[in-house]
Image (tube, rainbow, N blue to C red):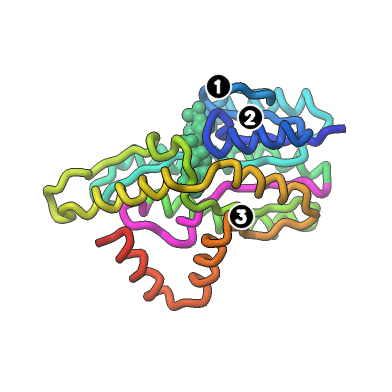
Amino acid sequence: MPKTVIVSGASGGIGFAIARFLQDSGYRVYGLSRSYPKEKYGFTHLLCDITDESQVRSSLKQIVEASDSIDALINCAGMGISGAVENTDPAQIRQMFDVNLFGTFRLTQELIPHLRKHPGSKILQIGSVAGCLPIPFQTYYSATKSAINAYTQGLRMELRPFGIQVGAILPGDTKTGFTAHRQKTDLGTEGPYGDRIRRSVERMERDEQQGKDPQTVARTVAKLLRKKTVPVFTAVGFSYRLFLFLNRILPSRFVTWILYQMYGK
Ligand SMILES: NC(=O)c1ccc[n+]([C@@H]2O[C@H](COP(=O)([O-])OP(=O)(O)OC[C@H]3O[C@@H](n4cnc5c(N)ncnc54)[C@H](OP(=O)(O)O)[C@@H]3O)[C@@H](O)[C@H]2O)c1
């Protein structure tokens, strides 16, 4: 009997790579996003805006009714915004928190009772290295990912007695449509930040577009789904594992200084 996995944000980028990879690996995959994937895909895709409570409810109801079991939830849908903290439109901040955080909360809350029926089931969040190493001018985005880390740790302890494994995968720069979808403010050179924001965002965009193939994240997810016990956090790729290790052992003041040299000046 194939295992059933639900992947949010499956219309493109990392979520699409995960959904297709898992489908090809023999899982029964349901993808959720607001638009259909542009590339050919073999998994079932439901249109669902994860910021809309009723859409989340009805999509998950449909999936649960059609499935013998729900074996894993991969919370991948996400978006990014950039700009100085003081100038960012509160509506934009709320929208991003609604997708990156509350969207994850909605799907997870709805599915826990179903996952609990199958010890060994898993909830995996697609977080980000930025949740551990916050980036200036993407401070709000970093805050959503940092919150995902805390959510992962707390939820893991809550669900441990039920045999539900909870972990976060932390990709670094990955070449997807995320760069083009980022909502940007403050790119002008006038004002107190001068040219810093434009330079920081340009550097980030360059790094992302030279980043890893989303398949690398898909392979990491597939590996974790096969494991009996998943780590709390899994960085994708050796260099990011090293950065996170150094972040744990070096003084925060020094780590923040390095990040400032890279993205803040
Ligand atoms: N790319 C990177 O460098 C990178 C690095 C670290 C972490 N991440 C994380 O990886 C995840 C996926 O990002 P990506 O790089 O694959 O970006 P992407 O190519 O822009 O894909 C984002 C996905 O999220 C979906 N989505 C956005 N808003 C949604 C909503 N309201 N309801 C349902 N689905 C929604 C989009 O589908 P629709 O627009 O069709 O709804 C799309 O499928 C995000 O959580 C991101 O923070 C990315």
* Residue 177: x %, y % from top left: 44, 35
The residue that disc 2 covers is: 31
Rounded to the nearest angstrom, the CA distance separating label 3 from label 1 is 28 Å
Please say if 155 is above or below 117.
below
Q: Residues within 10 Å of mark 2 (few under 14, many from 20)?
A: many
Q: In which quadrant of the rendered view does residue 259 lie?
A: bottom left
Q: Is residue 163 rendered to the left or right of residue 35?
A: right
User: Is residue 1 at all visible to an observer of this figure?
Assistant: yes
Q: Look at the numbered disc 1 and give the secondary structure of its residue.
A: loop
Disc number at residue 36?
Answer: 1
In contact (CB < 8 Å): disc 2 and disc 3:
no
Q: Residue furthest left?
A: 190
Q: Residue at x 17, y 44 (%)?
A: 188
- What's the magenta region? 119-139
* Residue 104: x %, y % from top left: 57, 42
Q: Nearer the viewer, residue 219 or 165?
A: 219
